[in-house]
Image (tube, helix red, strand yellow):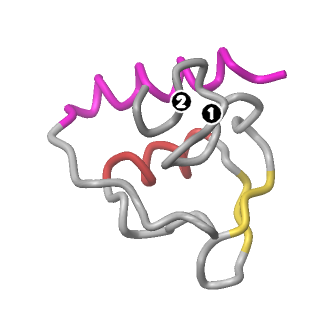
Amino acid sequence: MSCHGGSFQGGVGPSWVGLADSEVELADGSTVIADDEYLFEAIRDPSAKVVAGFSGMPPNSLSDEEIREVVAFIRSLAD
């Protein structure tokens, strides 16, 4: 919550609201669709594809199942 905002509208990290299946610009200038595969990878390896305007997320020790649960939560915040 401290990184993505108390209501997940963004802050130190990008907003999760409306993120699922949206187009995301990355720090290298490329874009990706924030599908489940991208979200999983972004959580598993935070430095792999950093969102433009952000410095990246610190490493974590979430299990694959925990990451899938976070991805499902992000998907539930779709507009």
Which residue corresponds to the image point at 43% horizontal and 53% vertical from the top-left?
41
Which numbered tag is attached to residue 16?
A: 1
* Mark number displayed over residue 5: 2
At a point 70% along the width and 28% down the height, the residue shown is 17
Q: Report whether 50 appears left or right of 45.
A: right
**Total marks in image:** 2
Residue range in magenta is 62-79
Quarter of the picture holding the C terminus: top right
Return the disc, 2 or 1, that comes first in the chain's sequence.
2
Q: Is residue 53 above or below residue 33?
A: below
Which tag is nearer the camera, tag 2 or tag 1?
2
Residue 75 lies within the magenta run: yes
Residue 26 locus on image (x, y percent):
64, 71
Q: Nearer the viewer, residue 9 or 42?
A: 9
The reply, left or right, for residue 61 in relation to residue 65 is left
The crowding category of the residue bearing disc 2, from other C-alpha atoms within 10 Å (few below 14, some 14 to 19, many at least 20), is some
The residue under label 2 is which amino acid type?
Answer: Gly
- SS at badge 2: loop
Please name whichever residue, 20 or 53, is drawn nearer the observer in this view of the structure. 53
Residue 26 or residue 34, whichever sits in front: 26
